[in-house]
Amino acid sequence: MLYPRMTSSRMVFELNGIWDFKLLKKKEERDAGRRLKDSMPMPVPSSYNDIYPGRDFADHVGDMVYQRTFTVTNPVKQGRLFLRFGAVTHTAEVWLNGELLGSHKGGFLPFSFEISKQSRVGENLLTVFVNNIVDYTTLPCGRVVEEEFPGLEQRTVNLPNFDFYNYSGIMRPVWIYTTPDVYIEDIEVYGKMDGSVYWKIQAEGESADKAKVTVRVLDAEGRCVYTGTGYSGSGRVEAPRLWDTQDPYLYRLWVRLQSKSGNVDEYTEIFGFREVSIRDCRILLNEKPVYLKGFGKHEEGGSRGRGTDMALMTKDLGLLKWIGANSFRTSHYPNSEEMMQLCDRMGILVIDESPAVGLNTGFTATGLLGGNPKGTWETLRTKEHHKHVMEEMVKRDKNHPCVIAWSAANEPASQEDGAKEYFAPLVALTKEKDIQKRPVTIVTYEGSTPKTCKVAELCDFLVLNRYRGWYDTEGNLKGAAVKLKEELEGFHVRCPEKPIMLGEYGADTIAGLHDLNARLFSEEYQTEFMRAYGEVFDSLPYIAGEHVWVFADFATAENIKRVDGNKKGIFTRDRRPKQAAYFLKSRWEEIRNPY
Ligand code: BDP
């Protein structure tokens, strides 16, 4: 799916800014064709939750509505017009001038509608109904519970099956953009180490299959280094400058499509020449082993919640560089497109994770919110949606050189019967859709051991989340290290060829709390925790990476295991370093790649 870009044949207009907003009561009457009454101003993009005070406001369960007008001018009406959302969490129903355009399910991926017919020159009324419920059909998963207390009104509560606040709303940018009648719908481009470049163009419009396609590969200075023709094909660039973490050199594929009737569409897609592979317990970038150093990372902070914030995302990647990290996992949902573009540019490796978190009816990270005694895979109804989401994610992110692997899920019930049957088709589909055949993984939790895990063989590399020394063996890091090592050895025996990395390990830490005896919650304990895990990794040659949980403190649902959110951040929520940041910085600066 192409990012909206201005080209010689396309105009792009942002619809970001202050929209009208209203929370809707159950069964409240709606009229998408009229201006909202009693609305409040709401910034887009942002999560709506923390913008105004009030617990009922922030924790609203169900529907809300966003509305705005925009003006279309005559020149804009010449070609085709599209409306595109970066992400609306979790479902959106979109109306223009009182006509339903369509709906979209899944809160972290883009979608668009053609509005050539429904839009008019002059003022247009755009209305978006948003629903934020998570249940056994959505990704992420949750439960809806009707709470009843004598003498009180019934109350609907939505219990997330995951450990992050259920931020929602129009969280990423909104645009309208034009294209000619016959236009480029999608581009796939892959550059390999030997300079071979493969492309595939998808076009739409009358006799689109008869249009003439020209492609050019441009280097970073804009010099043309290859020209080709055809909807799909391959060519070769002499001695390409490869993309890697030290030198994230980017090329562009310029595409020109000329229809039979003579209309021309142009688009330029960014890509890099690089290869990812796996061999002998190693993840290889351009045939050289790369040890992954970094974090699981939430896309959030401050009063905008998960709303796209270019300053915050750039600062975060600057901090990753500062600390000596080279990678992160987009835990637990695809991050914004702008973030992926920035990672391409700054040379940060990304494990791109789907929003499939909480697929576990017997477990949640907080140990409090889950709890359905029935088997996960008989209970959940996410399978078809999950396939759709994996396809959408690959479609959106396929060309990014920064994406080195796909994660199909975080901490599913991978030890339960039915897990293999659930995930095998998803892994196969992901591979089928990705011409680069990037590695696929399923991130597993401690309930899924070397003996009980049912999905290890499906994964190209194993990513394990472990909290020895925190959720068990707490305060006893020597004991924790023994347990951790035993388990890693167990997985290595089971899958001797596969790289193994930690996807999460961490300890809640209150910034400013110091303790000479390195007790739980102190900055010293977090540092010692990192040291203990580091020693285990260093003693096992098949460990291919370490992702600490978590980059920065983050908001969660209210519960007694969280004091003002999850505090396992190496940085605070406002991005100040805790003591362990300096330990990790010196450790990671020592671990040179390739190793
Ligand atoms: C893991 C989850 C992560 C949690 C973390 C924790 O993958 O989302 O935030 O535990 O407990 O189980 O901090």
Image: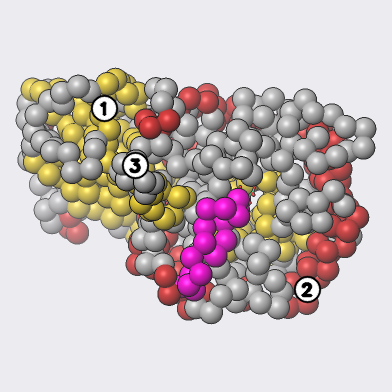
Give the mark nearest the N terminus, 1 or 3.
1
Front residue of 275 and 63: 63
**Which picture quadrant has residue 47?**
top left
Q: Would residue 442 appear left or right of 138 to someone viewing this image? A: right
Some atom of ligand 1 lies within 8 Å of the CB belonging to the residue at label 3: no
What secondary structure predominates along the stretch shown in magenta?
loop
Residue 376 lies within the magenta run: yes
Residue 112: where, in percent of width, then height? 25, 44
- Residue sitting nearer the eye, 117 or 32: 32
Identify the disc placed on residue 80.
none
| Tag 1 residue | 21
The residue stretch that appears in magenta: 362-377
Q: Which mark is residue 490?
A: 2
Name the residue nearer the viewer: 179 or 397: 397
Among numbered discs 1 and 2, the one appearing first in the sequence: 1
Q: Sequence-wise, which precedes: disc 3 or disc 2? A: 3
Look at the image and tell me whether residue 31 can be seen: yes
Residue 151 - label: 3
Label 3: which secondary element: loop
- Determine the secondary structure under disc 1: strand
Q: Nearer the viewer, mark 3 or mark 2?
A: 3
Measured as percent of width and height from the top left, residue 321 is found at 69, 34
Toward the front, the furthest residue is 151
